[in-house]
Image (cartoon, rainbow, N blue to C red):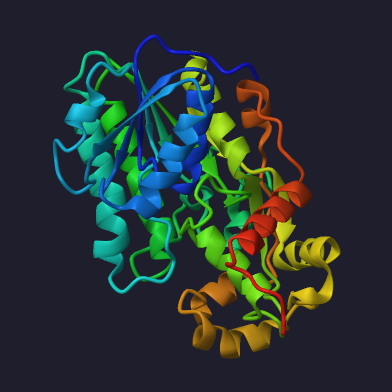
Amino acid sequence: MQMPQSPSPILVTGASGYVAGWIVHELLKAGNTVHATVRNLDDETKISPLRSMAENLPGELRLFSADLLQPGSFGEAMQNCKIIFHTASPFRLAVEDPQRDLIAPAVDGTRHLLEEVSKHESVKTVILTSSCAAIYGDNQDLQNTEKGVFDESCWNTSSSLGHQPYSYSKTMAERTAWEIAKSQASWRLVTINPSLVLGPAINPHATSESFHIMEQLGGGQMQAGVPDLEIGIVDVRDVAQAHIAAAFNQNAQGRYLTSGHDFSFLKVANILRAEFGDSYPFPRRTLPKWVAWLFGPLFDRALTRDYIRKNISYPFRADNTKAVNELGVSFRSAQESIREMMQQMIDSQRIKKSP
């Protein structure tokens, strides 16, 4: 798609994040002025990649400090902006305090951002990075869908603070956003709901949970085998494309499930082996469900027995028709996303060859 240019600055929150980095890249590439917020302007590990990227692109990058938990924090960065991309939200599965580490930043952060939006007459469009986690909580939820697939009409009703708290945080944040959006008429809200995001990052040291999963696949933690888990995957650049298309297409409305492929952990591992050979301890088989149930919680706190019971050996099916037809998203192959992500991780020494 031809990247549009806005006469006014465009705000991207959480600009050092995985998805946000590519949104900023594409906006700058088209010559836009981007107001990019980060939590700490002194964190060079997150700021430097953004600055380096901006030096080679025609647009202008302006950095601002903002905190999701501080009301009014985004006011300065929002000045004169017509379009806002709200991507800032944590993606971590294993946390000490789900309420503090997931729910509060996601829900309160979304509320604070949108309350600030309503104070700025210039803002006409808000694109919220939600998640497939707000569409479904567990793979077994597929049994309760009307069409036998997850689509934009589905809402996650099975997650809670005690079960799948990350998914619960994304669900509550998106519901909060829609409640606020429907209470006013000065700006429109669109949500992008991606599945597991893969592909290279603007910052090779990105900390998204996606990289943790790839580190487990390539670093030996899953060498004995992977759980029989089906997921949706999508390239980070395609997710960025969906955000931008939704922002500049005035007919875009509602939610957009953005998932390129129905996949499994074993398929990911098989692609990795085909691309990089046996120099890395990629898993070769699927573990029986009873083995995952017995040992999973010992190796990964996110793999609770309740999660295993409701997800392992259940199919995943997602319908991306709306994103394709209305946003014009053309999804990259899974092979391209997986190969380029792992190559970046190898080049940056995040994954090393077996001795």
Q: Is residue 169 above or below residue 73?
A: below
Residue 77, given in percent of the width and then of the height, sits at: 24, 29
Report how many numbered discs are placed on residues in the image. Answer: 0
Is residue 140 found left or right of 65 in the rendered image?
right
The residue depicted at 31 percent of the width and 66 percent of the height is 98
Frontmost residue, 59 versus 152: 59
Is residue 63 found left or right of 214 in the rendered image?
left
Frontmost residue, 150 versus 192: 192
The quarter in which the C terminus is drawn is bottom right
Determine the image quadrant of residue 111: top left
The quarter in which the N terminus is drawn is top right
Frontmost residue, 311 versus 261: 261
Q: Is residue 296 above or below residue 254?
A: below
Frontmost residue, 49 versus 118: 49
Task: Answer yes or no: is residue 320 visible.
Answer: yes
Residue 175, given in percent of the width and then of the height, sits at: 35, 42
Residue 106, given in percent of the width and then of the height, sits at: 31, 50
Determine the image quadrant of residue 188: top left
Residue 332, given in percent of the width and then of the height, sits at: 73, 39
The residue depicted at 74 percent of the width and 62 percent of the height is 268
Is residue 115 found left or right of 210 in the rendered image?
left
- In the picture as drawn, the residue positioned furthest to the top comes out as 7
Is residue 59 found left or right of 149 in the rendered image?
left
The residue depicted at 40 percent of the width and 46 percent of the height is 48
Task: Answer yes or no: is residue 129 visible.
Answer: no
